[in-house]
Amino acid sequence: MQETALLNMVPRTSTSKGANKLLRNNGYLPGNIFGKGMESISIAVKKDEFKKSIKEYGRNAVFKLVDTNNKEYTVMTKEITVAPLINEISHLNFQLVSLSEAIKQEVAFKIIGTEFLESKRLLLNSHVDSVPVSGLPHDIPHELEIDVSSMNSGDSLLFKDIKLPEGITSDVDPELKIITVKGLKRQEVAASE
């Protein structure tokens, strides 16, 4: 079970482009909290605190957002918008969650062991970067690790080959191809030497 990250938030009174730019210039990230049966709440969190929390707890962390009146919201990050030209986070969407109800969340794959494939002159082709999984918020993993170090040319990894953590399920097709490995053709090997 993962820990809950604590983040302070402030309400946003204006959601205009200019107001959001001013927030960003002052070190805040504009965002929204949404959930079933509630109106969206416009908020802002400190950019440095959010980035530190994501680094420490992971992309699928459970956050306790606390407003200036000490009202708490238990949330998970649903969407992180990145400004493409500057590659910086520009907006956040948080989903209100209950720690006792299963949710659906996208989980990324972390591929390890690629250096072994490279040493054997093999190419890795990743077909899928992430998959939707379901489970209790604290059980949702930050990422699903895939070790490719023992794979050989012609090998494929299907979704059914990945062991999900206890309490986590997915409705992804078990035959979904996640990774394939192939060898370099002789011409490619000669050209790279």
Image (cartoon, rainbow, N blue to C red):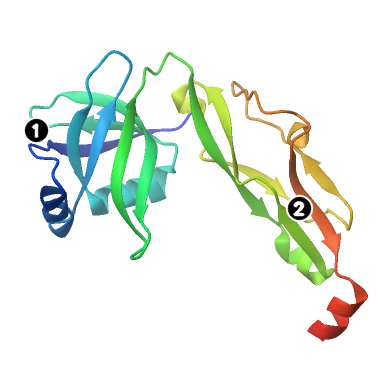
**Horizontal and vertical percent for residue 100?**
42, 13
Q: Quadrant of residue 2?
A: top left
Question: Vertically, is 151 above or below 164?
Answer: below
**Horizontal and vertical percent for residue 71?**
15, 24
The residue where tag 1 is placed is 68
User: Mark 1 or mark 2, which is nearer the start of the sequence?
Assistant: 1
**Horizontal and vertical percent for residue 150?**
83, 54
Query: Which residue is at the far right?
Result: 186
Name the amino acid type tagged 2. Val
Instruction: Give 88 or 102, whichever is nearer the viewer.
Output: 88
Question: Vertically, is 193 above or below 56?
Answer: below
In the rendered image, which quarter contains the C terminus? bottom right
Instruction: Give 102 or 123, whichever is nearer the viewer.
Output: 123
Q: Quadrant of residue 21?
A: bottom left
Q: Dot 2: what SS?
A: loop
Q: Residues within 10 Å of mark 1 (few under 14, many from 20)?
A: few
Name the amino acid type tagged 1. Thr
Question: Vertically, is 121 above or below 156?
Answer: below
Instruction: Give 26 or 144, whichever is nearer the viewer.
Output: 26
Label 2 to label 1: alpha-carbon separation = 47 Å
The mark total stands at 2
Q: Dot 1: what SS?
A: loop
Q: Is residue 169 left or right of residue 57?
A: right
The residue where tag 2 is placed is 148
Q: Quadrant of residue 149?
A: bottom right
Q: Residues within 10 Å of mark 2 (few under 14, many from 20)?
A: many
Q: Is residue 122 left or right of residue 23?
A: right
Residue 90 disc label: none
**Horizontal and vertical percent for residue 170?**
63, 25
Q: Identify the residue at horizontal 52%, vertical 35% (top origin).
A: 106
